[in-house]
Image (spheres, rainbow, N blue to C red):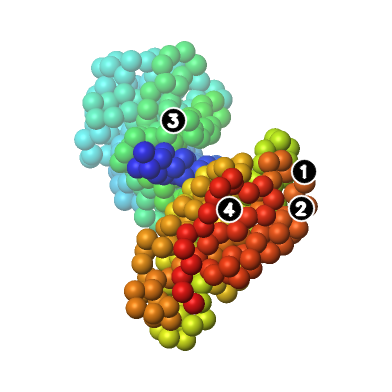
Amino acid sequence: MSTGMDSKNSIFGQQDRAVARWPAWLVLALGLVATLGATVAVWRTEVDRAREAFNREANDGALALQRELQLVLTQVNGLGYYFASDHPDPERFRALVRSLSEQQPAVRGVAWLLPETGECWTATDLRSRDLCGRWQGGQLGLDLDNVIDMVQETGTPELIGYPTSDGHLLLQLAPAGAGAVAGLLDLATIAQTAGDDRLFPDDMMVRVLDKPDEGTAVPVFQHVGTGEPLRRYRYVRALSAGPSRQLTIEAWPKRSYLWSAVPATPWVIAGAGLLISFLGFFYVGSLIRYTANVEAEVQERTRQLDQANRQLAILARLDPLTGLRNRRAFLEDAESVLGRCSSQGEGAMVMMIDIDHFKQYNDHYGHRAGDHCLQRVAAAIASCCRGEDDTVGRYGGEEFAVVIPCNAAIAAQVAERIRDAVAQMEIPHGFGGAGATVSISAGVFVSEHVESANLLSEWLEFADQALYRAKAAGRNRIEYAGFVSPGAETSADVSA
């Protein structure tokens, strides 16, 4: 049964400890929520900053590309202005084209187109000859003669797309005398020469689109880099490529760009927040455990103190030698017994007992033997008084007192039983001669009706007087006061 109770108490104790730890879990939960919120907020701020940095970098690249493109267009236009004469020198033209190609690798081919005569002057490079051949064969896919007429009428250059087998180049037409100078421009090469090393980094995707008034946008330049682009962070800008044509540049950052652009601040905050949260959790948990241990120790000490107080209270009521009630406890309990007898209309007896010639026994055998004798006599008296309300105590020295709820007949029986119990122990008593044993004398007061518990002291006095009469009559006998048992005779005297 105790094992089950201990197990139940252990289960409830574990539940109580788990409930008691809720402040620590609350601290941890609040810390984690705060850490998550702070990390997300700082992360978003840093991502916005990285996005702004990306837009600035992409815009710088777009402006550099714009400047380089304008420079190349201006140089090609310069050829047209230089050869404004109706009778140009072909050799001089080729020399200038070779010089321009060396200075601008983005210029992939240059030709002088004369629609009136059908002539096409070129340098020696293949692209220029291909340009002439396709123009003369009508394979450019557009009415180039009308475009040349428009250029000559307006006096301004025109930029158009030029689809080729190895990419989408730009075809620029500039007025030049009776014809026009045509230049093939590679925007990828322009982008490479626009920056010192690389115009756009590998963690950025960039493309330039050429979209005519009617038609599908065609990429004329594309920088893919490595990794997938983040499509939600799109940069767009228009590039001016001439009076009547615009290109569009688009850019997206890669995931690696954001990782490199975002500082370690969010992760520092996350790490610090987690550290503080768990430190707070363990700190509060340790405080809870410390408090619980202190409370448990206080409870244990309180329990021990209560137990000690109870033991002291018990010891304060007991005679340390015999284990019977001491005089004060006996008087308190005896008054309680008489009070119950008075309320229930019952009778009671008071018996005073004294060990015969105990002083001589003590002197003869010593105090240790005397103490042992007192213990054995006390045990014999107690063995005869086992009723719930039977009250036995050591009244002082070798005197004992007994209070029992009963009538006169039972009182006589109990008294004789006590005297016989002591006699049957046959404790040797050298003072009485050979074969003498320890005996007791007793005085008994009996009342068939207890009127009041306050009569205890008076009854004890009556019983004590009867005890003295028993001693005077020769000891080892019982004398009665109040109601005396009819025909009750005490046993023979022990010789003095």
What's the CA distance linking mark 3 and mark 1?
Answer: 109 Å
Q: Earlier in the sequence, mark 4 or mark 2?
A: 4
According to the picture, the residue beneath numbered tag 2 turns out to be: 455
Front in this rendered view, residue 228 or 466: 466
What's the CA distance linking mark 4 and mark 3?
Answer: 101 Å
Q: Earlier in the sequence, mark 3 or mark 1?
A: 3
According to the picture, the residue beneath numbered tag 4 turns out to be: 391
Q: Hey, which quadrant is residue 154 in on the image?
A: top right
The residue shown at (46%, 45%) is 13
According to the picture, the residue beneath numbered tag 1 turns out to be: 451
Front in this rendered view, residue 309 or 249: 309
Which of pointers 4 and 3 indicates the residue nearer the eye? 4
What's the CA distance linking mark 2 and mark 3?
Answer: 109 Å
Residue 287 seen in the figure: no
The kind of residue tagged 2 is Leu
Q: Hey, which quadrant is residue 343 in on the image?
A: top right
The residue shown at (44%, 42%) is 9
The kind of residue tagged 4 is Thr
According to the picture, the residue beneath numbered tag 3 turns out to be: 231
Circle 4 SS class = strand
